[in-house]
């Protein structure tokens, strides 16, 4: 398969493992997939391949990317991903179905409110534990509603560059998706994660979740550089056998 016109070279085993996770998600067993590796090893390209496979299987796909430049608002990758999934959706219907959680979601997604409502800032909940919990619960509720309509693959790219609020929300969501038709894919540079800092703590907590699977990408071997014929490649990824938790 290709994404953006570029064929994926190698990574057959990794795509097969992702296909097994999509099979789980389709029957309502939520999964998280962590893709780690050094810069330039192909983490985002693999995530794009997984997204394309998910679309082929009639999943909805939503992307969010952390900003490496700084200056982005709190929760930025989540705001991008949720907005991309909500595009074209009747937000009034979503707001009605969420109910009381709507007022908390306005902190991230003011478009869920009326035009006369004041836009909230996600930073206001950073230091208020109660408000943060209510917001996180509302995000989980929204994801549950959206994935119930059609299975969802949600990809968060370069999470090593995410703000603290986004990392905390990631940890909360990963602990809540076990019974949702949702695949959460996270890419990160393992060279920028340190044991003991928040990023390391969040990733360690994700690894303890029973829904979590991992891929540690390394450079390709010489015999992986030449891709197989397109028909063979596509068949192998879409009829892949189940893999183990870590590939």
Image (tube, rainbow, N blue to C red):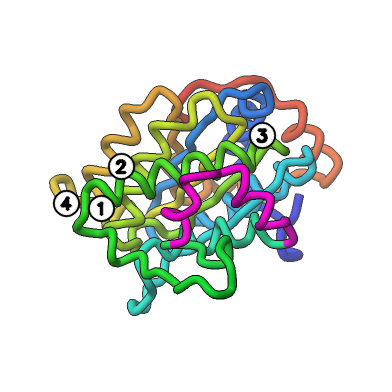
The local secondary structure at tag 4 comes to loop
Residue 85 drawn above or below residue 67: above
Q: Nearer the viewer, mark 3 or mark 2?
A: 3
Sort mark 3 into few (<14), some (14-19) or many (20+) by Cα contacts within 10 Å. some
Quick one: 65 or 16, which is closer to the camera?
Answer: 65
Q: Which residue is mark 3?
A: 148
N-term mark: 1 or 2: 1
Quick one: 220 or 197, which is closer to the camera?
Answer: 197
Asked if disc 4 and disc 1 are in contact, CB closer than 8 Å, the reply is yes
Residue 241 drawn above or below residue 66: above
Q: Which residue is mark 2?
A: 203
Q: Which residues are magenta?
A: 88-106
Q: Residue at x 52, y 60 (%)?
A: 64
In space, the residues marked 3 and 2 are separated at their CA atoms by 27 Å
Q: Residue at x 38, y 46 (%)?
A: 136
In the rendered structure, find residue 42 and report the number of the disc placed on it: none
Q: Residue at x 35, y 61 (%)?
A: 162
Q: Position of residue 148 (x, y in %)?
A: 66, 34
Asked if disc 1 and disc 2 are in contact, CB closer than 8 Å, the reply is yes
Was residue 178 drawn as part of the magenta stretch in this picture? no
Q: Position of residue 191 (x, y in %)?
A: 28, 56
Q: Which residue is mark 1?
A: 193
Quarter of the image holding residue 19? top right
Asked if disc 4 and disc 3 are in contact, CB closer than 8 Å, the reply is no
Q: Residue at x 34, y 35 (%)?
A: 206
In space, the residues marked 1 and 2 are separated at their CA atoms by 9 Å
């Amino acid at each position: 398969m290709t994404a953006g016109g570029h064929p994926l070279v190698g990574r057959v085993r990794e795509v097969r493992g992702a296909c097994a996770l999509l099979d789980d998600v389709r029957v309502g067993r939520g999964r998280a997939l962590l893709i780690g590796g050094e810069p330039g090893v192909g983490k985002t390209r693999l995530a794009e391949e997984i997204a394309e496979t998910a679309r082929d299987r009639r999943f909805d796909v939503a992307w969010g990317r952390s900003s490496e430049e700084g200056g982005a608002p709190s929760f930025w990758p989540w705001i991008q991903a949720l907005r991309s999934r909500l595009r074209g959706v009747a937000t009034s219907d979503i707001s009605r179905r969420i109910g009381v959680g709507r007022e908390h979601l306005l902190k991230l997604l003011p478009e869920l409110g009326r035009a006369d409502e004041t836009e909230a800032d996600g930073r206001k909940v950073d230091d208020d534990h109660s408000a943060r919990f209510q917001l996180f619960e509302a995000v989980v509720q929204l994801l549950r509603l959206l994935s119930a309509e059609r299975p969802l693959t949600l990809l968060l790219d370069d999470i090593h560059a995410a703000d603290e609020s986004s990392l905390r929300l990631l940890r909360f969501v990963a602990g809540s998706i076990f019974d949702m038709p949702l695949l959460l894919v996270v890419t990160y540079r393992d060279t920028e994660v340190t044991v003991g800092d928040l990023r390391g703590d969040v990733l360690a907590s994700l690894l303890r979740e029973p829904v979590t699977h991992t891929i540690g990408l390394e450079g390709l071997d010489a015999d992986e550089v030449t891709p197989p014929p397109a028909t063979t490649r596509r068949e192998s990824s879409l009829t892949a056998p189940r893999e183990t938790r870590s590939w």
